[in-house]
Amino acid sequence: MTTGRTIIVGDVHGCAEELEQLFDKVHVARNDHVVFVGDLVAKGPDSRGVVALARSCNATIVRGNHEEKLLQWRAAERKGQPDKVPLSRVHREVAEAFTREDWAMIEGTPFFVELPDHDALVVHAGVDPTLPLASQKPDVMMRVRTVKDGKATDKGDGKGSHLWGELYKGPPHVVFGHNAAPGLQLHPWATGLDTGCVYGGQLTAMLLDPGERIPSNPDARKRVLVHVKALRTYSEPGTPPPPGEAANS
């Protein structure tokens, strides 16, 4: 079988209908390599449907902070201590719906995926641009948004802070998600694909032909991106959780 395209999909957050539309739009083939940047689950209406679609194309899934939350709870539950990792309502709904097959799908997720044919690296949130790639910590790769006073943080863009992608100098080119607030991010060496589908925005994917490098020019890079509009708004960004529930981006 000849090598197909690489299709990197941004944060889906349970938006299974939009993911199905995206797959139809790009005509996913059996020899294509589909890679998700993480956060397939929670907030949207059909997390199990998203996982099933990922399974149907033998996709590679990078671990997002929402998958990590579920896996931490799962590990505690197996030890008979589920209360040690409290779940919000949206995460509990996913955990209760998951089958053994679903759990197996996310338990094997790595914190990053290297794509040497494209000179690219896929992570969920990003990297600390002040450190070499070999020194990156999983929690940073799942949560970083900005750099302030030389320190990587999960806080949003504020006074004195910079989006980490603005400061990162590759190679490799890093493709990520997690931070929907700025919208599509087109930095010289990093591309942020979280365009807020679950918030009524778009679901975005990057399509690369075999051996194709990610274009450094932003306009050229836009030509390898595909978008599907959200069918509705499933969750409001920045909505505080009910009392006793932890906020999770």
Image: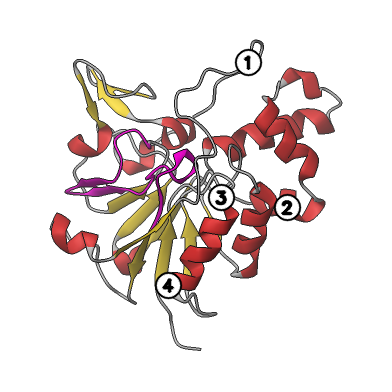
User: Neighbour class for label 1 at 10 Å: few (<14), some, many (≥20)?
Assistant: few
Residue matched to label 3: 15
Distance from the alpha carbon under mark 1 to that under mark 2? 27 Å
Looking at marks 3 and 1 on the same chain, the residue that comes earlier in the sequence is marked by 3
Distance from the alpha carbon under mark 4 to that under mark 3? 17 Å
User: Neighbour class for label 4 at 10 Å: few (<14), some, many (≥20)?
Assistant: few
Residue matched to label 4: 26
Residue matched to label 1: 242
Q: Are marks 3 and 2 in contact (CB under 8 Å)?
A: no
Left or right: residue 155 compared with residue 217: right
In front of the other: label 1 or label 2?
A: 1
Looking at marks 4 and 1 on the same chain, the residue that comes earlier in the sequence is marked by 4
Residue matched to label 2: 102
Distance from the alpha carbon under mark 4 to that under mark 1? 38 Å
Looking at marks 3 and 2 on the same chain, the residue that comes earlier in the sequence is marked by 3
Span highlighted in magenta in the image: 180-204
Q: Is residue 20 visible?
A: yes
- Above or below: residue 19 compared with residue 166: below
Residue shown at the point (27%, 72%) measured from the top left = 212
Question: What kind of residue is marked 4?
Answer: Val
Distance from the alpha carbon under mark 3 to that under mark 2? 16 Å
Q: Is residue 72 visible?
A: no
Looking at marks 4 and 3 on the same chain, the residue that comes earlier in the sequence is marked by 3
Q: Position of residue 129 (x, y in %)?
A: 26, 35
